[in-house]
Amino acid sequence: MKFNRLGPSRRIDENVVFVLSFIRMKHQPISGARAKLAASLPSTTEILRGSLLHRHIRHRSGCTVCADGGGHPVWVLTVTYPGGRTKQISLSSQQKPMVQRWLRNYRKLKDTLERICELNQQLLREERNA
């Protein structure tokens, strides 16, 4: 008869020990993958949600560039809010690289969080089936 470290009054069946050990073995690779994903997350202070658009602004009168039909190129950050509300922010050309980086960080953060959630679901399924 085998006993656990809690004493003889709390006997653990050998099959239960095997199942618990098997679950722990499966947890380790998933936990390692989660930790690796969490370590790769970008800074949460340098994120931005939205879309970067390249537009042309045209003045109605008095501008020779606009009169020729070209317009003035401008970068715009567009953010959509619940209810269909949209906010647009005009950007300088110096801001464009920073905004692109922040948008990339947001997408990477969102994708990584989704992957971590998938791993957590996998852990829950394995524990339930054990």
Image (cartoon, rainbow, N blue to C red):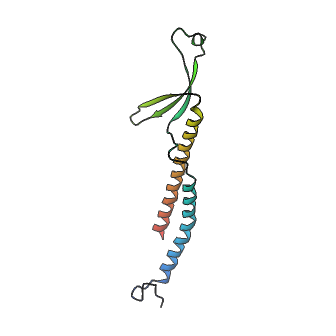
Question: Dividing the picture into quarters, in which one does residue 8 lie?
Answer: bottom left
Relative to the observer, which residue lies in front, 127 or 30?
Answer: 30
Relative to the observer, which residue lies in front, 13 or 62?
Answer: 62
Q: Extreme front residue here?
A: 94
Q: Extreme bottom residue here?
A: 1
**Residue 29 image offset from top left, x and y in percent:** 58, 65
**Residue 38 image offset from top left, x and y in percent:** 54, 55
Q: Residue at x 45, y 34 (%)?
A: 80
Number of disc labels: 0
Q: Is residue 87 above or below residue 19?
A: above
Q: Residue at x 50, y 75 (%)?
A: 20
**Residue 1 image offset from top left, x and y in percent:** 47, 91
Q: Is residue 46 above or below residue 119?
A: above
Q: Is residue 44 above or below residue 86?
A: below
Q: Residue at x 56, y 10 (%)?
A: 63
Question: Dividing the picture into quarters, in which one does residue 81 lie?
Answer: top left
9 horizontally vs 74: left or right: left
Q: Residue at x 53, y 71 (%)?
A: 24
